[in-house]
Image (spheres, helix red, strand yellow):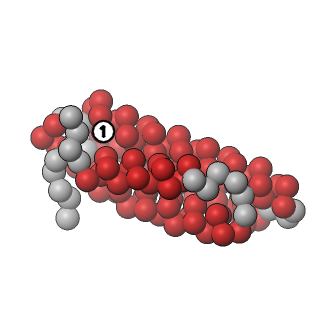
Amino acid sequence: MEDNLSLENLENLHTSVEAIRLYNDDNYKRLDNLMQEYWIILKDLHKIAPAIFNNLATNGITDLINRSNLIGRAIDSLEKSERYKDYWDYLMHMIKITIDYIKNYLPESLVSTNVD
């Protein structure tokens, strides 16, 4: 059983992201804030186990930032909505992968490590 603050935070984050599935300006701001929370958690995990989280912490975060930026550059509301859906889907995917990595690849001794 994983008794881990990062795991618990990710599961809570997943629930929060799930709640803002539909695009509007407020949800876009909230999604960006949640993505930043995810980024902080992932950076801490990367410090604990860089070999496991390197790709997510580099390429995954870059992809999330790019997807967010595309929403800001969208011209009409339909395009913004489509790009938001892509951004939302990708953030959900990244959170799920990170949870799976913690459960499947992190040794129990590292799972309970607190990174400062």
- Quadrant of the image containing the C terminus: bottom left
Q: How many marks?
A: 1
Instruction: Give amino acid for label 1.
Output: Ile
Which residue is situated farthest in the top direction here?
104
**Left of 14 or right of it: where is 50?**
left
Which residue is tagged 1? 102
* Res. 87 visible in picture: no
- Residue placed at 66% from the left, 69% from the top? 26
- The location of residue 107, given as percent across then percent down, is 18, 35
Q: Residues within 10 Å of mark 1 (few under 14, many from 20)?
A: many
Relative to 93, does residue 25 appear above or below in the rendering?
below
- Residue placed at 57% from the left, 66% from the top? 30
Q: Nearer the viewer, residue 48 or 32?
A: 32
Relative to 49, does residue 30 appear above or below in the rendering?
below
**SS type, badge 1:** helix
- The location of residue 4, given as percent across then percent down, is 23, 48
**Left of 50 or right of it: where is 83?**
right
Relative to 32, does residue 62 appear above or below in the rendering?
above
- The location of residue 25, given as percent across then percent down, is 71, 68
- Residue placed at 77% from the left, 50% from the top? 82
Query: Which quarter of the figure has residue 78?
Result: bottom right
- Quadrant of the image containing the N terminus: top left
**Left of 23 or right of it: where is 29?**
left
* Res. 51 visible in picture: yes
- Residue placed at 20% from the left, 59% from the top? 115
**Left of 72 or right of it: where is 116?**
left
- The location of residue 24, given as percent across then percent down, is 72, 64
